[in-house]
Structures are given as C-alpha cells and as structure tokens.
Amino acid sequence: MLKDIVAVEPRENYQLYIRFEDSIEGVIDVSQIVKFTGVFAPLQDREYFAQVEVNHEVGTIQWQSGADLDPDVLYAIISNQPIPNNQLSRSA
C-alpha cells in the first residue's frame, strides 16, 4: 500500500479523521485498535490525544510522546482492504 497520510483531525471519543495522499479518507476509532498502555498511555488524556499531528517525513500520524500508528494498517481499516501478505512478512 505505502500511502502517506496527508491530513489528520481529532474528533470526539478517540476518533480521528484521516486523509491519505490518494484521497482515501475516513474516521477511525483509535480506542478500538490501540490499548492505552506503554507509549500509548498518554493518549487516554483527551486533550493530549487531540494534539495528534502528521509526520510528513514518514507519512504517518504521531504524538509528542513518540507514539505513532502504522499508516498501512490505518489505510487497510479505512479503505476496507486487507494488507497484502508480502507486507505482513516484512513488518514481522
């Protein structure tokens, strides 16, 4: 897939609006895909969660704590397309 995220907007209840470089866009509920522990623990604070930003260098979203999310996983969820098997083996 390898589509970069170009826009992100925080929404209520741990949701994010995300737009990719190919204009695929949608809203994702982060609380359904991430446990708020470890590097993700600060995201429990809704004000902190809302400070999400796009890291244009790597094409994903991130928070100041260093927490980020894999854009391929987000793309697969938003576009309702599975991640190709060859990409899964590269990330293992």
Image (tube, rainbow, N blue to C red):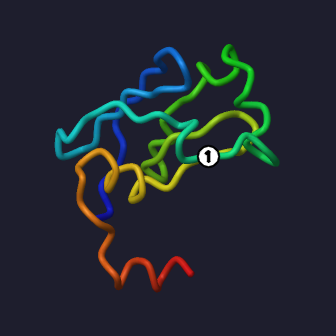
Q: Position of residue 26 (x, y in %)?
A: 28, 33
Judge whether 91 appears above or below 26 on screen: below
Judge whether 16 appears above or below 84 on screen: above
Please state which amino acid type lies under the numbered disc 1. Answer: Val
Residue at left 70%, top 21%?
48
Number of marks in the image?
A: 1
Q: Position of residue 92 (x, y in %)?
A: 57, 81
Residue labelled with disc 1? 34
Residue 41: quarter of image: top right
Residue at left 30%, top 55%?
3
Residue 16: quarter of image: top left
Judge whether 59 appears above or below 44 on screen: below
Q: Is residue 1 left or right of residue 41?
A: left
> Callout 1 environment at 10 Å: few (<14), some (14 to 19), or many (20+)?
few
Residue at left 50%, top 14%?
12
Residue at the far left in the pictured view: 23
Residue at the far front in the pictured view: 32
Residue 13: quarter of image: top right
Of the pair 6 and 44, the residue shown nearer to us:
44
Q: Position of residue 35 (x, y in %)?
A: 68, 45
Of the pair 9 and 59, the residue shown nearer to us:
9
Residue at left 67%, top 17%?
46
Judge whether 16 appears above or below 89 on screen: above
In what element is the residue under mark 1?
Answer: loop
Q: Which quadrant would the N terminus be assigned to in this image?
A: bottom left
Q: Is residue 33 left or right of residue 40?
A: left
